[in-house]
Structures are given as C-alpha cells and as structure tokens.
Image (spheres, grey):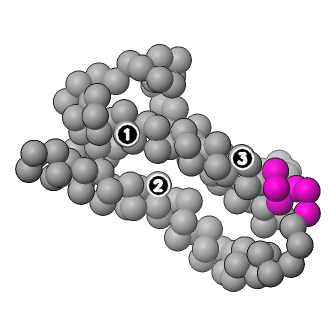
Amino acid sequence: MLNMMSLILRNLFFTLIHPGLVVGLVPYWILGDKVVKSFTKPLYLYQYLGILIFIVGLIILFDCIIRFLFQGRGTLSPIDPTKRLVISGLYKYSRNPMYLGVMMILIGEAIFSNQVVCGYI
C-alpha cells in the first residue's frame, strides 16, 4: 500500500513537472491573462472548438498516465520509468500517445486564445 501511494505521488509530481510546464506554465508566460479575460466575454465558435480539442487531449494524457501507473508500475518520467511494458489502450497503436495528448492540448490552447500562426520557417 505504501509503495502504491509513493507511485501515485511520483506520478503526480512528474505530471506537474513534465506536461504541466509545457501545457500550463509556458503558455501562461506567453499569453498572460488573455485566456482568463476570454472567459469574461461570450465565447466564439472557434473557442468552443479549442476547448473540445483541449479536453480530448487531456483525456488522452490522463489515460496514458493512469496506464503507466497501474499497468506499467512506473511514471511518465524517464528518470522513473515503468517496470512493465504498457500495450493496451492507445499504446496498442502507438508507442507515444502521450505526445498526441500534449499536442492536442497545445493546439486547443492556441485555437482558444486565437494565437494560431501558420507559415514557413
């Protein structure tokens, strides 16, 4: 029981550090209070689309993390990897569905905040 509680706490910590920084803190640094102020006005259709994409990405991310916790007996961090190979759920089709979830969250944030930039580098 103590081992499982430790594993849950480690997963929570690494979730806040790895995807939390990428989809939370960095976009906040870039956008500031623009997103918070968006909720004070009526939302546009593209913002609802952004919210939908964000939620789907969040579900994918949390599904992957929970599979790592219970089936893989590890965390999403390379520092504390899984003990068993996870081959169910989205891992049946891809080795990195967590990246898909994080990218969908970022795309949803960009669409919601109207910060989508297209172009060539």
Badge 3 marks a residue whose secondary structure is helix
Q: Earlier in the sequence, mark 3 or mark 2?
A: 2
Please state which of residues 114 and 120 is positioned toward the viewer in this rendering.
114
Question: Taking 55 as reference, is 26 above or below it?
Answer: below
As measured in the structure, the alpha-carbon distance from the residue carrying label 3 to the one carrying label 1 is 20 Å
Type of amino acid under label 2: Pro
Snapshot quadrant of residue 50: bottom right
Q: Residues within 10 Å of mark 3 (few under 14, many from 20)?
A: many
As measured in the structure, the alpha-carbon distance from the residue carrying label 3 to the one carrying label 2 is 16 Å
Type of amino acid under label 3: Ile
Badge 1 marks a residue whose secondary structure is helix
Question: Taking 25 as reference, is 93 above or below it?
Answer: above
Q: x%, y% of residue 89?
A: 47, 23
Residue drawn at the location 30% of the way across and 51% of the way down: 11
Which disc is residue 11 wearing?
Answer: none
Q: Are marks 3 and 1 in contact (CB under 8 Å)?
A: no
Q: Is residue 45 left or right of residue 65?
A: right
Give the residue at mark 2.
19
In front: label 3 or label 2: 3
Quadrant location, the N terminus = top left
Q: x%, y% of residue 82?
A: 25, 34
Type of amino acid under label 1: Ile
As measured in the structure, the alpha-carbon distance from the residue carrying label 1 to the one carrying label 2 is 14 Å
Give the residue at mark 3.
53
Give the residue at mark 1.
66
| Residues rendered magenta in the picture | 44-49
Q: Earlier in the sequence, mark 3 or mark 1?
A: 3
Residue drawn at the location 61% of the way across and 74% of the way down: 28
Q: Residues within 10 Å of mark 1 (few under 14, many from 20)?
A: some
Residue drawn at the location 28% of the way across and 34% of the way down: 70
